Image: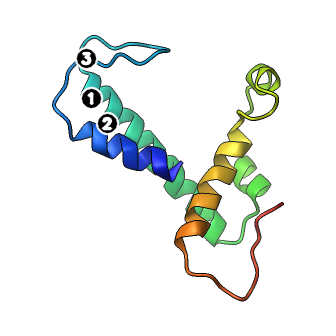
Amino acid sequence: MGTQIASLKTVADLDFDMLLCGHYPRYKNGRDHIRTKLDFLENFYGDIIHLWEQGYSEKQVFHQLKLKEAYLTKFLCFGNVSMLNGVRSVIRHYEGLRPVQNSGSRLAV
């Protein structure tokens, strides 16, 4: 998810009005919609990392944030698209940015 945030920051700096994404095109205020999405993702990322640093596990973070799975989407995507995977993606990205520590990782394999 960290790479999505970086990409959205790059796009938000561009001068445009129309956003022609495949699932929901925006014909006006495209950059504002990108900024709204960016704000949501940055807050989501920050909330996850805040709980992770307090020692919560991936599943505890998921429950603490009161996230819900879209089970039909998860089923149709063979489990690849899920909110829990979003939490795991944030943690993997964050852990990849940190220096390696000898104390071990809490990431579930």
Under mark 1, the amino acid is Asp
Rendered residue at 52%/69% (across/down): 97
Under mark 3, the amino acid is Met
Question: Of marks 3 and 2, which one's residue comes earlier in the chain?
Answer: 3
Question: In what element is the residue under mark 3?
Answer: loop
- Alpha-carbon neighbours of circle 1 within 10 Å: few (<14), some, or many (≥20)? some
Camera-side residue: 77 or 54? 77
Rendered residue at 80%/25% (across/down): 71
Residue 60: x percent and y percent? 76, 56
Q: State which quadrant residue 35 falls in.
A: top left
Picture layout, residue 18 above or below residue 41: above
Residue 2: x percent and y percent? 49, 52
Q: Which mark is residue 35?
A: 2
Question: In what element is the residue under mark 2?
Answer: helix
Q: Is residue 1 visible to the viewer in this orientation of the structure?
A: yes
Residue hosting label 3:
18
Residue hosting label 1:
32
- Alpha-carbon neighbours of circle 3 within 10 Å: few (<14), some, or many (≥20)? some
Picture layout, residue 109 above or below residue 30: below
Residue 33: x percent and y percent? 33, 27
**Mark 3 and mark 2: span between their CA atoms?**
13 Å
Question: In what element is the residue under mark 1?
Answer: helix
Under mark 2, the amino acid is Arg
Q: Which mark is residue 88?
A: none
